[in-house]
Amino acid sequence: MLRPLPMANPLWAPWRIEYILSPKDRSRGCVFCGVAEASADELRARHVVCVTESAFVVLNRYPFASGHLLVVPHAHVDAVEALDDTAYDALFRLLRESVVRVKRAFKPEGLNVGLNLGAVAGAGIAEHAHAHVVPRWSGDTNFMPVLADVRVVPQALDATLDHLAPHFADVPGRVRGPAACP
Ligand SMILES: [Zn+2]
């Protein structure tokens, strides 16, 4: 008799928590849109680390680890192939810059970098494609997914923003950053 094979237990399953914790109230519009026009104070309030002409870096509100970043094109598209070449290149250049800066700022032992494309693949905000950069340390496996109702205190995100933003000050093509800590 055929039996389904047991599924391997992935060491890191970001798709589970991203979808579970994603905002379900969409009445206020896309959380990733409007950053290109936002003031420095608004960028700070939204925990945006760095803005370039075509993309931006923002702290994940529900991080797996301190310094979990999202790299997001300004264009509201649900697929990377929907980006034009300029926006696509800008997204992945900023992704590379983000990896460099996360390594400098947090000295992780490793990183996860990736995209969850489509709700079935775990994207919490599937309609606006974005990439994840997650610093990793040995022993941190799955510490957030077991706490599905955890809410990260805003102060922790503010402190992370203050630590990280200066590392992004010299990103090529940077046009704006968050207001400094008041
Ligand atoms: Zn959007």
Image (spheres, helix red, strand yellow):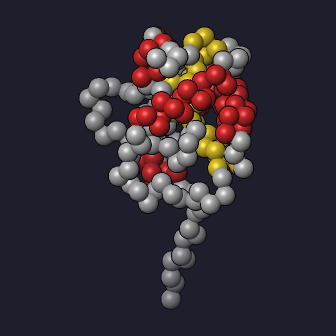
Which residue ends up furthest to the front in the rendered image? 182
Residue 119 to residue 85: above or below: below
Residue 41 to residue 30: above or below: above
Residue shown at the point (26%, 29%) measured from the top left: 27
Residue shown at the point (38%, 50%) measured from the top left: 150
Q: Position of residue 125 (x, y in %)?
A: 43, 37
User: Is residue 175 something that shows in the picture?
Assistant: yes
Q: How many marks?
A: 0
Residue shown at the point (69%, 45%) measured from the top left: 108
Q: Nearer the viewer, residue 115 or 154?
A: 154
Q: Is residue 31 left or right of residue 178?
A: left
Q: Position of residue 54 (x, y in %)?
A: 59, 17
User: Is residue 124 something that shows in the picture?
Assistant: no
Q: Is residue 45 left or right of residue 136?
A: left
Q: Nearer the viewer, residue 122 or 140?
A: 140
Residue 132 to residue 140: above or below: above
Residue shown at the point (50%, 15%) measured from the top left: 179
Q: Is residue 22 left or right of residue 143?
A: left
Q: Position of residue 134 (x, y in %)?
A: 60, 43
Q: Nearer the viewer, residue 13 or 64?
A: 64
Which residue ends up furthest to the bottom in the rendered image? 1
Q: Is residue 11 left or right of residue 122?
A: right
